[in-house]
Image (cartoon, rainbow, N blue to C red):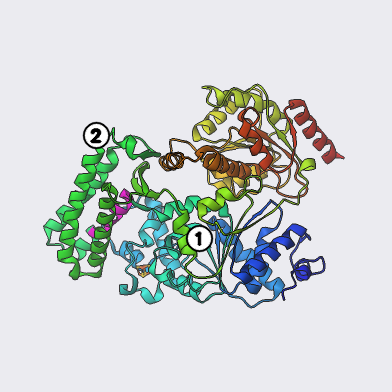
């Protein structure tokens, strides 16, 4: 029988070996609930407020009882943190001989085959001189690295375009046909994952490869006794993405590029092949050019007004059909050409499916447009059934945990979305004293959020609060446009004199380092800073949120889901949009108080929090802070804090 009480006690093994370990009843209870679910192969959905210590709460029972465990996190940074710091720390405290493996998506590992091709390709074009220098670094690194993980090669920036030329995709990997198969980094990482006791993955990899598609990983999930999702609030979004079908012009251009290289090397005299490859490239680029907008999502209904999109798509289908035919006749000349044939046939099938309205009828079809590419998506209207089917395949424990899964401790929205009808649910409040540590401030006199100059009004009411907090704030906006406007107004304001940082002016980690170092900065951000950001201490004393974070109803997937629910006689706003907004808001608000000594103000500018009947449900879902609508009270709070810190 596992004695968790003793492990988590003040004289237990955790306390003896983890610096700064505090005894928290919530953490022990959570560990007990997880241990119980692991033993009974149950599904547990567990919300743990900030400061509960949920990572240690799930790691202890997972390492002691979990058997073979997959832990999936929201980001690669968290994945590295678990693998390099948290799991080794708990493992050594518990003195259990479990083996750990870190598994990332294949784009994170150097591919010997594509590296060699790129080095040998005399026609290769590089974005700039640095890329050639990077290629030499990568070549040297690949020779002595044991993992081939690109995050270990600090000399080459993570976003350098050379990475695309030296890594593989599921499409262009030759698998067991590859001459480098025995030394392959991707295959080695998978081999280690298959033999390890604990495997750390991320949600994208879990859904894209482990659960669904990639052959080499299909053995991983069936062999597992326990699956733990950290940051589980992100799963509905990720599952939608990966349970759907999508094909991008980028994938088609990659295919065209590889087919060109293979054709030159193995079928140079077949001019018809070169011609059809060129025609496919042109048809692919032409399709992108039919949509003038950038960075947008368009539904089929929106595309009906675009008279050139349909013909361009049909033209692409025609050239792709010709390409597949020609590749079929030449494929036996090389493994590379055979790989291109398979990919071309697969891509053609995807585009045909997307074009054919009779296919994928329970999916919403839409287009995502980037600066240089576009992606055709077919997203399921409901992921619950698909997910439930995958989960029921064999008995094991499934643990879903995050600081934000419920609305006022009600998990029905999350469970409905994920198909977790039979799940146990549990909720542990943060151990922090929110009534003492934080104030929720909702300013008066703001217009309705659809007002044309709403953001200008928000900045006006925010200025005195930013002065009272002496900067040290996150200004979180619900749209990029509002974020730019806030920045513009603060730069112009004579009443504002603190360093300003803006999302996009450097990587997220660079901006956060700057923010911590400056100690009086204001960071203006949008979605990137709503979650997964941990700034402790006085450097972050104020979080301003411009609007309640309702997702845009123009989003094709959201609007199709809303329509479906309303057609079924359900109330999509109360059942879907509101709970999603609450979960998002809790994430944004969660940036403020990160430990027992943090103090600060959460300013939510949206008047609907007070004027609408649903507003109460929203603020009651937030931690129990003191509430005010008086600026004077906020100023007093900051003044008292200043006095206390100078005593
Ligand atoms: S098996 Fe695939 S990933 Fe590995 S080296 Fe060959 S092509 Fe690259």
Relative image position of residue 218 (x, y in whole percent): 42, 70
Residue at the spot x=35%, y=58% of the render?
Answer: 165
Q: CA distance from mark 2 to mark 1?
A: 45 Å
Q: Is residue 20 above or below residue 494?
A: below
Secondary structure category for the residue under label 1:
helix
Q: Earlier in the sequence, mark 2 or mark 1?
A: 1
Q: Main secondary structure of the magenta part?
A: helix
Which mark is drawn over residue 307?
2
Percent position of residue 219, x then y: 44, 73
Provide residue 388's location: percent of width, then percent of height. Answer: 48, 60
Q: Looking at the rendered structure, which numbered label has been put on residue 151?
A: 1
Query: Is residue 570 found inside the magenta-colored segment of the image?
Result: no
Membership of 249 in magenta stretch: yes
Q: Start and end of the magenta stretch?
A: 248-259
Neighbour tally class for label 2: few under 14, some 14-19, many 20 plus, Cα within 10 Å = few
- Mark 2 falls on what kind of element? loop
Q: Position of residue 238 (x, y in %)?
A: 48, 53
In the image, 554 versus 197, the foreground residue is 554
Q: Nearer the viewer, residue 404 or 99?
A: 404
Location of residue 583 by image quarter: top right
Residue pictured at 40% horizontal, 75% vertical: 183
């Amino acid at each position: 029988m596992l004695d968790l009480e003793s492990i988590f006690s003040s004289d237990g093994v955790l306390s003896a070996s983890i610096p700064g370990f505090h005894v928290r009843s919530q953490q022990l209870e959570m560990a007990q609930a997880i241990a119980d679910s692991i033993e009974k192969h149950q599904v547990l959905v567990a919300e743990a407020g900030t400061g509960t210590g949920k990572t240690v709460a799930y790691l202890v029972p997972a390492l002691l009882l979990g058997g073979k465990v997959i832990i999936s996190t929201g980001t690669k940074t968290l994945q590295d943190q678990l693998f390099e710091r948290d799991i080794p720390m708990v493992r050594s405290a518990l003195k259990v001989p479990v083996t750990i493996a870190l598994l990332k998506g294949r784009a994170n590992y150097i591919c010997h085959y594509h590296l060699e091709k790129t080095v040998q390709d005399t026609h290769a074009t590089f974005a700039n001189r640095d890329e050639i220098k990077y290629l030499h670094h990568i070549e040297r690194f690949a020779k002595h690295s044991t993992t081939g993980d690109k995050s270990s090669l600090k000399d080459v920036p993570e976003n350098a375009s050379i990475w695309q030329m030296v890594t593989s995709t599921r499409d262009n990997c030759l698998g067991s046909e590859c001459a480098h198969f025995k030394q392959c980094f991707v295959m080695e990482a998978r081999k280690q994952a298959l033999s390890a006791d604990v495997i750390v993955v991320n949600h994208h990899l879990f859904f894209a490869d482990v659960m669904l598609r990639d052959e080499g990983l299909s053995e991983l999930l069936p062999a597992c006794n326990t699956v733990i999702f950290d940051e589980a609030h992100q799963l509905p979004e990720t599952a939608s993405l990966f349970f759907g079908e999508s094909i991008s012009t980028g994938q088609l251009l990659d295919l065209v590029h590889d087919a060109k290289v293979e054709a030159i090397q193995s079928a140079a005299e077949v001019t018809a092949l070169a011609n059809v490859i060129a025609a496919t490239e042109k048809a692919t680029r032409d399709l992108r050019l039919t949509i003038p907008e950038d960075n947008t999502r368009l539904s089929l209904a929106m595309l009906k007004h675009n008279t050139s999109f349909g013909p361009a798509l049909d033209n692409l289908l025609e050239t792709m059909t010709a390409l597949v035919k020609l590749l079929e006749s030449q494929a036996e000349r090389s493994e590379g050409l055979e790989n291109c044939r398979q990919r071309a046939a697969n891509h053609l099938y995807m585009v045909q499916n997307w074009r054919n309205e009779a296919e994928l009828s329970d999916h919403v079809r839409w287009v995502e447009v980037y600066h240089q590419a576009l992606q055709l998506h077919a997203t399921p209207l409901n992921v619950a059934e698909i997910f439930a089917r995958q989960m029921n395949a064999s008995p094991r424990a499934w643990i879903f945990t995050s600081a934000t899964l419920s609305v006022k401790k009600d998990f029905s929205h999350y469970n409905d979305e994920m198909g977790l009808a039979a799940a146990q649910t549990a909720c542990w409040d943060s151990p922090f004293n929110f009534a003492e540590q934080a104030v929720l401030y909702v300013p008066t006199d703001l217009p309705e959020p659809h007002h044309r100059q709403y953001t200008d009004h928000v900045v006006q009411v925010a200025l005195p609060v930013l002065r009272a907090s002496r900067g040290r704030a996150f200004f979180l906006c619900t749209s990029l446009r509002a974020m730019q406007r806030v920045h513009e107004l603060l730069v112009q304001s004579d009443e504002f004199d603190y360093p300003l940082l803006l999302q996009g002016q450097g990587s997220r980690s660079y901006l956060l380092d700057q923010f911590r170092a400056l100690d009086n900065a204001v960071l203006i951000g949008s979605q990137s800073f709503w979650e997964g950001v941990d700034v402790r201490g006085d450097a972050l004393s104020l979080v301003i949120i411009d609007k309640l974070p309702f997702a845009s109803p123009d989003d094709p997937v959201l609007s199709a889901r809303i329509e479906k629910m309303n057609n079924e006689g359900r109330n999509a706003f109360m059942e879907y949009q509101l709970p999603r907004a609450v979960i998002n808001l809790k994430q944004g608000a969660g940036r403020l108080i990160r430990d027992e000594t943090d103090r600060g103000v959460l300013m939510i500018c949206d008047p609907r929090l007070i004027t609408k009947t649903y507003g109460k449900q929203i603020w009651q879902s937030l931690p129990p802070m003191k509430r005010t609508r008086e600026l004077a009270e906020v100023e007093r709070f900051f003044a008292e804090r200043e006095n206390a810190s100078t005593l």
